[in-house]
Amino acid sequence: MLTALATHFDRGRPVEAILAIARYAEQHHAAVLFASYRHQSAHGDTVAELKQAGYPVDGLCLRPDGSSAGKAEVKRNCRSGYEKKGFTLTADIGNRDTDLQGGHFEKGFKLPDHDGWLS
């Protein structure tokens, strides 16, 4: 689970270091799973954007449409859902504190958020 796409700088472009990690994971037969605060209605577009940027996509969990849950709760619920499906989340990589709140992963890695511009 990771911060994968630039939003304000080169919108839609991969965060190169994260793309390298995702490809490494794929080469070593680890699933690459995503959790995002985007609405569920954007699922197809989000998968397409990730794949166009070069990411393997083994799972994508998004905020349910109409949900008023905060970012931390949505992402925690995604991680918990992945666990219920049998995944062990070895790493959670994010650029916001809310990406790493609530557990359900073995190790968290906080990236710089550039004052919110990377989100």
Image (cartoon, rainbow, N blue to C red):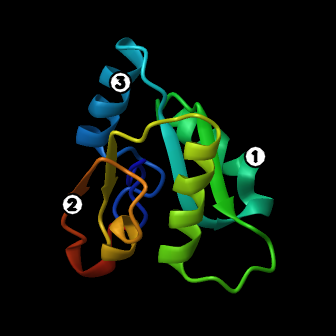
- Report the quarter where the C terminus lies: bottom left
Real-space Cα separation, disc 1 to disc 3, in angstroms: 23 Å
Check disc 1: other Cα within 10 Å, few if <14, some if 14-19, many if 20+.
few
- Which mark, residue 111? 2
Left or right, residue 63 beside residue 16:
right
Where is residue 3 shown, x and y percent of the image?
A: 38, 54
Q: Which residue does the image show at 39% across and 66% down from the upper left? A: 99
Regarding residue 38, the answer to whether it shows in the image is yes
Task: Give residue 21's quadrant in the image.
Answer: top left
Name which residue type carries label 2. Leu
Where is residue 71 shown, x and y percent of the image?
A: 52, 76
Check disc 2: other Cα within 10 Å, few if <14, some if 14-19, many if 20+.
some
Q: Which residue is mark 1?
A: 44
Check disc 3: other Cα within 10 Å, few if <14, some if 14-19, many if 20+.
some
Instruction: Label 3, secondary structure: give it.
Output: helix
Q: Which residue is mark 3?
A: 25
Where is residue 77 shown, x and y percent of the image?
A: 59, 63
Q: Closer to the observer: label 1 or label 3?
A: 3
Where is residue 109 shown, x and y percent of the image?
A: 22, 55
Regarding residue 8, the answer to whether it shows in the image is no
Residue that lies at the very extreme toward the bottom in this rendered image: 68
Q: Which residue does the image show at 31% across and 52% down from the upper left? A: 93
